[in-house]
Image (cartoon, rainbow, N blue to C red):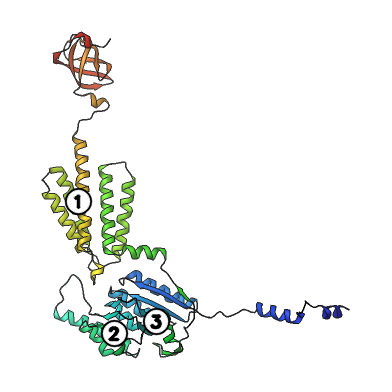
Amino acid sequence: MLHDSVSKFRFPSFPLGKLILVLGLLLVPRIASADILKIVVNGPIHTITADYVDRGIQEAQRTHADALLIEMNTPGGMMISMEDIIQKILAAPIPTIIYVTPAGGSASSAGFFILEAADVAAMAPGTNTGTAHPVIMGTTMDPVMKEKLENYGASLMRSYTVKRGRNPDVAESAVRASKTFTAEEALTQHLVEYIAKDENDLFHQLEGKTITRFDGSKTVLHVLDKPVHLYEMTLKQNILSFMMDPNISFLIFAIGLLAIYFEFNHPGAVIPGVVGFIAVLLSLYALNLLPFRSIALVMIVASFVLFALEAKFQTHGVIGLGGVVLMVLGALFLVDGPIPEMRVHVWAALAVSLPIGAITIFLMSIALKARRNKVVTGEQGMIGEIGIVCSALSPAGKVFVQGELWDAISSAPVEPGRQVVVRQVENLVLHVDPAASAVTKESIPV
């Protein structure tokens, strides 16, 4: 009977068997199609950039992405960070596509090395690449050192461009002769594989193409109509990347010193001291990740000493001007970046040094004047005040000072109506001396 009742059970126009089949299909785990992970490198190559690319590769591997797309626009950067990125890209378990964009952008210097390391190298129209001659900032290289550095850069470039199927001789010319290539020249001379006007155009060209990975394995790219997920920097990476701009680091360091200087001149303010201490530590942390010179920090600190001396000795701006010059030079020498974007600009050094010099001298002048002025409040404020004798001082009596009657002791007898000068205050008793002039009795308070 139970069998008959089940067999007769039907949904309207939908048999029970079909319902069970649909539910079964819904409950079977589905394998989601892989997506494209994208990261954006826009700015100088440094430690934070290398960390960002490394995390992007790890995320692409974790999510089983079909490919990692790196959109790049960089003037270059630090060689050690560049080498780290190249190693990560060559060892990446998923295909990496580097696309130089937007129009007007570039992959220069270290960016050229990174571009050539990709499984697929592409550029947007109007972009350029090259100028990859290695340099050591802050020193004049002798011929032997220059040759060693060129040979190292050239050998590094050849070591993977050959396996990528690109033109190693042309790539090497960008290292030895600092040659630059437009997108069209790079395509013609086999430095890149594609020129694409945008991301969709690039994916249309790549769809179904077979590429050879660095380990020799073959991979067919399926990237068309796949969702593209942007993998952004973490909050920490964004903050450090912002602070690793040498102009920003110098500004924060100078403002931090100014806040600490203000705290020293106004003890007990607390907030300026705390803010200044944090600012100095943050800037030093960021500078530690850059090729900075410690002597430049000493010069910047010494400039504040000169500002203080200007306020104290009033040399009509001579010492103050020396402080400004010292701060500007310290700023310019602060970071020895391999590219102009990784050094403090002259305009930034002047824009920070001149106002901070003026503010520091002004604050110091106020502090010095306050210390020189006579105290006008409390017991000490009574010293030197003129009082009127209300009852004869012989030697004790009453005097009228600052609108109040005070007990007073005089060094000599003084009659009522005479003026006295306060010399000392002890236990609310005034010690006075007779003054030369006298006043009428009408001026004595009743």
Q: Is residue 234 visible?
A: yes
The residue singled out by tag 1 in the image is 357
Q: Are marks 1 and 3 in contact (CB under 8 Å)?
A: no
Q: Amino acid at mark 3?
A: Ile
Residue placed at 41% from the left, 63% from the top? 235
Image-quadrant location for residue 284: bottom left
155 and 190: which is toward the camera: 190
Instruction: Measuring from the top left, give residue 53's x and y in whole percent.
Output: 39, 74
Label 1, secondary structure: give it: helix
Q: CA distance from mark 2 to mark 1?
A: 48 Å
Residue placed at 42% from the left, 74% from the top? 56
Instruction: Measuring from the top left, give residue 171's x and y in whole percent.
Output: 27, 86
Q: CA distance from mark 1 to mark 3?
A: 49 Å
Q: Circle 1: is it few (<14), some (14-19), or many (20+) Cα within 10 Å?
A: many
Relative placement, left or right, of 19 versus 162 is right
The residue singled out by tag 3 in the image is 97
- In this picture, is 231 found above or below 87? above
The residue singled out by tag 2 in the image is 157
Q: Circle 2: is it few (<14), some (14-19), or many (20+) Cα within 10 Å?
A: many
